[in-house]
Image (tube, rainbow, N blue to C red):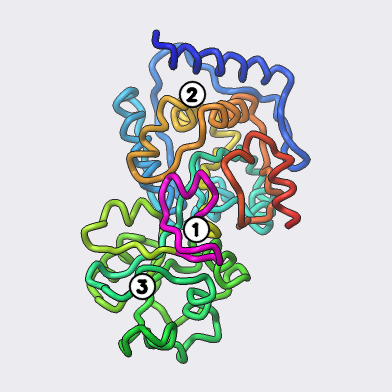
Amino acid sequence: MTTTMAGRGLLRCAALCLFLFGCGSDTAQNVPSGAAQNNGPLVGHVTVDGSSTVLPVSRAMAAAFQKANPSVQVSVETSGTTGGFRKFCAGQLDVSGASRPINAEEVKQCGASHVEYIELPVAFDSLSVVVNAKNTFVSCLTVPELKKMWEPTAAGKVTRWNQIRSTFPDEPLTLFGPGGDSGTFDYFTLAIVGEERKSRGDYMKSEDDTVLVSGIAGDPNALGYFGYAYYLANQDKLKLVGVDNGHGCVLPSAKTVEDMTYQPLARPIFVYLSASAAKRPEVHGFARFYVDPDNAKYTSEVGYVPLSTATLLTVERRLESTTTGSVFGGRGSVIGVSADMFDDEEKIKNALVR
C-alpha cells in the first residue's frame, strides 16, 4: 500500500469513527435506518436523472461502477435540475443530479410525498460563458456587461454587439442558454442579473447543453453559458470568455475555482440520494462509489474540480450516517460558496446570510 492510499485509509477510518457520534446541522437530521448491507455481488437497477451539468460526471461514474459491478444497471438521464427534482420528489428516482441546492418549493414537494433525501456535494463547476470559436473581438466581459445582455429589460432592445460595448462590431447578438428547468439558469440569473429566474426570454433555450453547444458553434455572433465540461468537450468549436467582476479578467479553470477568483460563476454541484432507495445495496453502493475520493479522477476527467479527500470523506460520512436534509435550508442558489465550506457548516450558514 502506498503512503497516499494508507493516508486515505486512515482518514476514512477516522471519518467512520466520527459517524458513531453523528453529524448534521440545523437543517439536517440523522435517520437511524442505517446504510444498506450486502454480503455478495451487487445486483439491481439504479435510476439517475436531473442536471445536465452533473450529467457528464454521473455518466462517467455509472460506467466505472457498472464495470466493477456488471450485475447492476445504472440508467442516467437528464431533464434539468428542476425537472429532476420534480421526478425525485414524486418518488420516481433513486438519485437526482443538481447544479444548485434543493430549494424551498422542492423541499415542500418532497415532504408532501414523504421523500427524504441525503444531500451529497460532489464537485465544483466553473460555469462558463462561451462564444463561437471564430469570434475575434470578445475575450472578456464584465459582470455589468453580462447583466446588460441578459436582464429582462434587454428583451427586444439589446440585440447587437455594439450595444454591449461601443468597440464591438455592429453585428447581431445571438444568445443561447438553458431553460427554466435548469439549475444553471437559476444560478446564472442570480449571479449575473441579481435575482434568481429573472432573465430576458428572447433567446434560444434548451435544457440539453449539447443543443446549446451546436447552436453557438453554428453562429459566429453567438454567446451562451453552461457547465465547463461542455466547453472542454467542444473546445475546438467554442471560445471561452473571461469574466471581470471588478478585479480583472479571469478565465474558468481548476485554479481559479480553488482560489475563489472565478466569481461569481464558480459553484458546487450535487447528487441527492433517496433515503429509502439508499437501503437497497446497489443504490447505496453506487452513491458510495460516487463520493469515494479514489474515484475523484472521473470528476476531473470531465472538467470539474473534485472536492478534497478530506471533504469527500465528510460527505461519505453523511451518506453512511443517512443524514437527511439540506445544509442550505431550502435556499436554492447561493453565491460565493467555496470548497472548504463543506468541512465546516458554520461557513455555509454565514454565506446564507450575506
Indicate which disc, 3 or 2, sits on the residue closer to the N terminus: 3
Q: Which amino acid does label 3 sit on?
A: Leu
Q: Is residue 23 above or below residue 152?
A: above
Q: Which amino acid does label 2 sit on?
A: Pro
Residue found at the very far front of the displayed protein = 248
Q: Tell me what residue is drawn at x 46 percent, y 38 percent.
A: 306
Dot 2 corresponds to which residue? 281
| Residue 96 appearing in the image | no
Q: Residue 349 at x, y = what percent? A: 74, 46
| Residue 12 appearing in the image | yes
Indicate which disc, 2 or 1, sits on the residue closer to the N terminus: 1
Q: Which of marks 3 and 1 is in front?
A: 3
Count of numbered tags: 3
Left or right: residue 162 compared with residue 200: left
Marking on residue 223: 3
Instruction: Say which quarter of the image contains residue 222.
Output: bottom left
Instruction: Say which quarter of the image contains residue 114.
Output: top right
Q: Which of 73 and 6 is in front in this view?
A: 6
Q: SS of the residue at dot 3?
A: strand
Q: Give the range drawn in magenta.
A: 243-262
Per the model, the C-alpha gap separating discs 2 and 1 is: 26 Å
Dot 1 corresponds to which residue? 83
Per the model, the C-alpha gap separating discs 3 and 2 is: 44 Å
